[in-house]
Amino acid sequence: MHRPVLVREVLAALALKPGVTVIDGTVGAGGHAAKIAAAVGPSGRVVGVDRDSLMLRHAAEALASYPWATVHQASHSELRTALDDAGVDRADAVLLDLGLSSDQLADETRGFAFQLGDGRGGGPLDLRFDVRHGRPAADLLVEADEAELTRLFTEYGEHPRAAAIAAEIVRRRDVAPIRFADELAALVEAVAPAGGGSHPATRIFQALRIAVNDELGHVERTLADVLPAVLKPGGRAAILTFHSLEDRLVKRAFVEANGWRPLAKKPVTATPSETRLNPRARSAKLRAALRTTA
Ligand SMILES: C[S@@+](CC[C@H](N)C(=O)[O-])C[C@H]1O[C@@H](n2cnc3c(N)ncnc32)[C@H](O)[C@@H]1O
């Protein structure tokens, strides 16, 4: 089950009170959204958005006792469409909790679950949040040239053996395409053996996931155009990131010159007691800002 991160800190940053309208742009399993729905009460509204239909089913269950919360399949970069569906003009607060849910990590149908190592192949290497758009990761591994793969693994995975892993993928795919998550995990392990800590393929899967979902492109569009358009003046945005690439985008966006007043200079991070209970909280950074212009 997915355990939401920095819940108390997120609720405080959004300054919620009964009757306000909140968008959860990455509603996931609905952990944060259920707390938000309880805080805004029946006179408020919660609009939950996710790209992944599996996650929307979990969210709908978590929000079943809050009829003032609705869920919509869309990217957070398409919030306007979701708000029109929900009959909402602008919101008082927006939350984005970027990255992957534990429920997706346990899903063996799209290749997120490579670490299960249960001999069932870890699922087809897809890694898309919304399988109606884009191309599966297996196709990217067939189509991208070695330089492009090296760039992805370096930039999005910050993997020290990026070039060697890309070279091995190109060598292997000439023999047979890499179609299952476990095949790729084993290939990476052969080139870059585990040195303690997380599985050596974790960052390669992260890089492919960022690429096939164009994750940074969506975050950039949301920060530049979407949040300013959907938030009321004086409204608040809170964004949880899990790697430096995303945190950098948020930090650069939340500045006075762009019509934001950051609530703090430094991001909020999890306490040692939260990271003990929830290892995913270890890399979480929360940045929040107030919208100063219309
Ligand atoms: C870390 S989980 C959110 C967990 C949620 N806060 C909770 O408490 O259950 C991140 C979610 O963002 C979704 N996601 C990723 N990129 C997205 C995008 N561009 N637009 C909307 N949802 C996205 C994923 O499908 C996933 O469900």
Image: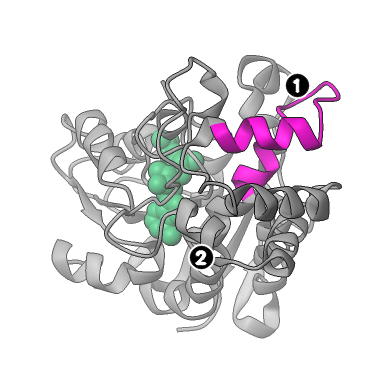
**The magenta segment:** 183-206
The location of residue 136, given as percent across then percent down, is 42, 55
The location of residue 266, given as percent across then percent down, is 79, 53
Asked if residue 15 is positioned above or below residue 292 in the image, the reply reads above
**In front: 42, or 97?**
97
The location of residue 78, given as percent across then percent down, is 33, 70
* Whether residue 85 is visible: yes
Alpha carbon distance from label 2 to label 1:
32 Å
Q: Where does label 2 land, which residue?
A: 214
Residue contact at pointers 2 and 1, CB within 8 angstroms: no
Q: Where does label 1 land, which residue?
A: 272
**Helix or strand or loop: what does disc 1 sit on?**
helix
Residue located at (32% from left, 34% from top)? 34
**Helix or strand or loop: what does disc 2 sit on?**
loop
Residue 189 relative to residue 41: left or right: right
**In front: 122, or 219?**
122
Is the CB atom of the residue marked by disc 1 within 8 angstroms of ligand 1's nearest atom? no
- Count residues near mark 2 (Cα–Cα under 10 Å), then give few for <14, some for 14-19, many for 20+: few
Q: Is residue 204 magenta?
A: yes
- Count residues near mark 1 (Cα–Cα under 10 Å), then give few for <14, some for 14-19, many for 20+: few
Going from the N terminus, do you reach mark 2 or mark 1 first?
A: 2
> Residue flagged by tag 1: what amino acid is it?
Pro
Q: How many marks?
A: 2
The location of residue 174, given as percent across then percent down, is 60, 54
In terms of image quadrants, where is residue 53? top left
Residue located at (71% from left, 44% from top)? 268
> Residue flagged by tag 2: what amino acid is it?
Asp
Q: Is residue 207 magenta?
A: no
Residue 162 relative to residue 35: left or right: right
* Whether residue 25 is visible: no
**In front: 146, or 123?**
146
Give the color scheme: rainbow, by chain, secondary structure or one colour: one colour
